[in-house]
Image (tube, rainbow, N blue to C red):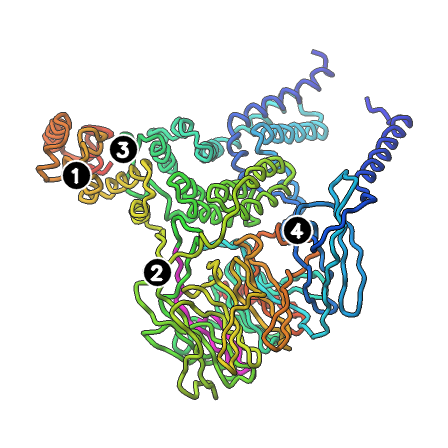
Amino acid sequence: MNSRLKNRLVPLLLFVAVFVAVFLLLRYTFLQKEYFGLFLNTPDYWTDLWNGPHPLWTLAGDFLSQFYRLSWVGPALTALLATGCFLLLRLFLKRFQIPLAAVIFTALLVAALLPKARERERWAKVEYASLHMQWDKVLSVATPEASAEDRVLIPYALLAHSERGTLPQNMFRYPVLGPEDIDLEGELTRHGYYFTSLVNECMGCTNEAIHNTFQAACTTPYGTSFGTLRQLIKFNIASGNKAMARKYCDILEKSPFNAATARSARKVVEAMPERSYLDHGPSDTAAVITHNTIRNLRLLAGAGYFNAAAADRYRCLLLLQRDLRSFASSFPPEEDLTALPVTYQQALCLISDRDIQRRLSPAVLESFNQYMQEYNNLRSKEDDPILPGSFWEYYFLGY
Amino acid sequence: MDVEPKPSNMYGQFRFIVLFTLLAALCGCSPKEFDEQDGYPPIFPDYTGVTVPEGSAPLTFRMEDGRKFRLEQRREGDTLWTTVKAWRRGARRGTRYAPFPIIYSHDPIDPYIVYRLIEPGYESWRNMGLYQRELSSYDESPVVTNRANNLGCVNCHTFDGGSPERMLFHARGRGGGTVFADGDNVKVLNLTQVGPHRQGTYPAWHPEGRYVVFSSNNTRQCFTIRNDQPIEVYDTDSDLIVYDSATDSVQMLVETRETLETFPSWSPDGKTLYWCEAVDPGRIPASRGEVHYRLMAAPFADGALAGEPRIVFGNDSLSVSFPRVNGRWLLFTAASFGTFPIWHKEAELMLLDLETGAVRTVTELNSDQTDSYHSWSSGGQWVVFSSRRLDGRYTRLFISHFDGEGHFSKPFLLPQEDPDFNQLRLKSYNIPEFITGRVPDRQEAIAGLFKEEETK
């Protein structure tokens, strides 16, 4: 290979290598960076930018962040930056042998990216997939094994199961320790608000979804972001608030790369009917939400907004709290208990109520008797689990 | 291989630019013919028929539907007649609307308004601050931002008689307290560590400058699951305290278990203290619909109430907040219940004639969205108030002229250099207060207070 060809080929290969590596390792990190990024051509944006630290550097980052919505842009820019650095390095340190420098450079880059980056990428992937309701993708990342290593994944996995209607069957396959694993109500961080917003969207609590989107927005440098603006447009369309949806469209349109999204959302907004404020005035009786998830779910039930996912979520929370009485009373008296998921029947087994026992599946009762025999012979928690993934395992052994 | 651009290419590019510019100019040209249309043009903001102070920043607007337009203006005495000709891009005919008046008033208005800018979320915020806006221009500058107190909350600003020299505001968070600024001197006082150990909330500075009455509120909020009113803010307890700036001391002024007292306000002579009071029904927020604040008054002298409180106005169908007296007139906000009208779409401004006791809804100021916090100019001829009429969520400021006989002119939106600015701004305007001059820059001194607190 002549040296001229080598001079051109090595940077090209480096670009490709870095692009592929970053695409595979950090694609979702960039997508989520875009969600919380902001570049708007509005007076307030420019004022905040110039009043903040390092405005020019920040401006460059903000401007580029809007393009990360395309999954290849972040990796391509990183590859470009890496190649540029390499070329500069080569220019100033000509005595370095090129292939060696390339290898060292790439190795250093990859080493620097791993393993923290992989953990961040995994979070970003479940966040992104949850936002887009890609529950299979969430579950492919947030497996019981991965969740054992990284407990942050558990609420996302349980949300995915809840939305697929498989929460009771699968919850105890995960290393759940208590009610805090099903929601992040107490997690007053950007990620906590992000997740709580998603949960409330899934439960149909649009007000609370908006509230938590606002909360997440307040954790960003400008108090808003591309992603939160898009979510606010979506929620305000869902709740029929034309004026607010239109406002957020107007603002999002000031981001060059989001302008098309904003314009197409505006078409939906303009087709919405106008509402009279008199129909939607204050209410002194409207159910109010709190930071207590169980109470919120009870209120949802009382207010008649109890979809199947919310019902499962409520019952599973009661199981995590070991509140078997409330759990049992959440079923109507005429409910066919044999048709319930096995986990639910396992919980109902533990209630000393003859009527309930009589209505359970004989197979579950038999299994319970066997379990109790083994449990009575169990010596310590460190022994192998008796029936992994069962409610009894959680109830008696705490995992 | 780098190649210098050929002259012919440059010429080609130049020709293209000239052609494009000409085409763009032709497309943007106004039509020659216009259809006459009765009625004022649909413009945003709606400045048709408003009364503005002489010397106010120019009122900029655009067509509501985004059409291009041209203005013809002529001034006749104190009235500026504006004719709008509007057309769609590329149209051969446009529309000529009836000329609308803008009336210029010589009644003096204070040169600045101070307000807080904050995201209208419910619990958290990022950047917030107190800002002053010069009314003769579009100039807005910070009085203090929450960068001074480590992104904590800054709120409830008030001025001694509208003077920029003497002000106070609360700075919440670590090392927080009430910041008093007097000329170049600034200090922070944690009211919970003096006197009755009660925190200060809504302030009212006595016209003579020595006393400040605060309500001391234990404020909570709750969120509705599915209702257009997303939030209700309520007090579980509130009383009145008085701060004496001569002795730096705090005393209880009104303290009861059965009632909630809030929103203190002074008569212009400082001899009467007004406030709002509600019977505490208990179990708030479940019972929030039963909370109706009434307007109270009592004589005040030497740092204490000098007589029995009396009910000035109130009934069980509305709740009074923000009483503000201007001579014989008292302007207040009325909501159907509760103490936080900004989240009540039905909240509107009402005017009480203190001489006759007559109360009326100020229909000329109100809208079908929240109309709430208001403040009189020092001369009493203008009022600024906050309203959510643009979109139902982001509070904006409107100014109206008052004729002294109980009538207001059509309010106008605080003008901005770009009329879309009000739509694009993602912050709400809180607590607008007129002041008689520019607040000196004390940001460094105030930030220093919190650095001192951090190092303690």
**Mark 3 vs mark 2, CA separation in Å:** 34 Å
* Residue underneath mark 1: A333
**What stretch of residues is rendered in magenta?**
B200-222
Whether labels 4 and 2 belong to a single chain: the reply is yes
Q: Secondary structure at mark 4?
A: loop
Three-letter code for the amino acid on which mark 4 is drawn: Asp
Q: Secondary structure at mark 3?
A: helix
* Residue underneath mark 3: A168
Q: Mark 3 touching mark 2, by CB under 8 A?
A: no
* Lower sequence index among marks 3 and 1: 3
Question: Which chain is disc 3 placed on?
Answer: A
B215 falls in the magenta region: yes
Residue B283 drawn above or below residue A68: below
Residue visible at 48% across and 69% down in the picture: B177
Three-letter code for the amino acid on which mark 3 is drawn: Pro
Relative placement, left or right, of B9 versus A301 is right
Q: Residue B420, which numbered label? A: 4
